[in-house]
Amino acid sequence: MSVLTLEQANAIVAGALAKARDAGFKPLTVAVVDAGGSLIALQRSDASPAIRPAVAQGKAAGAVAMGVSSRTLGEMAVDRPHFIGSVAPLAPYGLVPVAGGVIVRDGAGIAIGGVGISGDTSDNDELCALAGIAAAGLNA
């Protein structure tokens, strides 16, 4: 069974922050969690607001807990708001149902963790998450 290592988590963070820097995005916070939703790595860019770590971790851990991206959780929230509203408090780090939380998969397609990003638009957060995962040689 594959696990998401600290080295891989740090590579995801570095790749995501590099993408944000190159694109001129706002300051980001990046959280990487393992397959159980526990935090492995978290970095907050200079000037990133204090709430961002909780949002980033909620995106990452929520995606892992539910087995779908936080973007998909947002779509589910529109279709089934009572379900998402009911299940969100059950998740240890909450659910943040907007884009920016992506499941990390190994070469065999097995979910080994998640990355959540907060700081720019949700779409840009997701772009950076995908770039970070790719930079680490893993799959979304």
Image (spheres, rainbow, N blue to C red):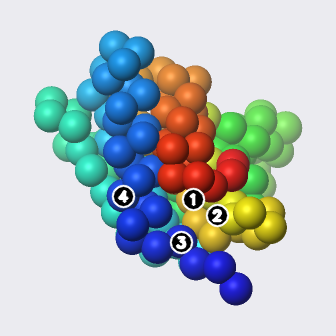
SS for dot 4:
helix
**Quick check: 66 above or below 137?**
below
Q: Nearer the viewer, residue 22 or 44?
A: 22
Image point (75%, 42%), residue name = 72
The residue labelled by disc 3 is 4
Q: Secondary structure at mark 2?
A: helix
Give the residue type at disc 3: Leu
Q: Which of the two discs, 2 and 1, labels the residue nearer the N terminus?
A: 2
> Can you identify the residue that label 4 sits on?
10
Which badge, 1 or 3, is on the more N-terminal residue?
Answer: 3
Q: Label 1, on which residue?
A: 114
Label 2: how many Cα within 10 Å (few below 14, some 14–19, many 20+)? many
In this picture, residue 55 sits left or right of residue 72: left
Residue 130 on image: x %, y %: 59, 39
Does dot 1 land on a helix, a strand or a loop?
A: strand
- Callout 1–callout 3 Cβ contact below 8 Å: no
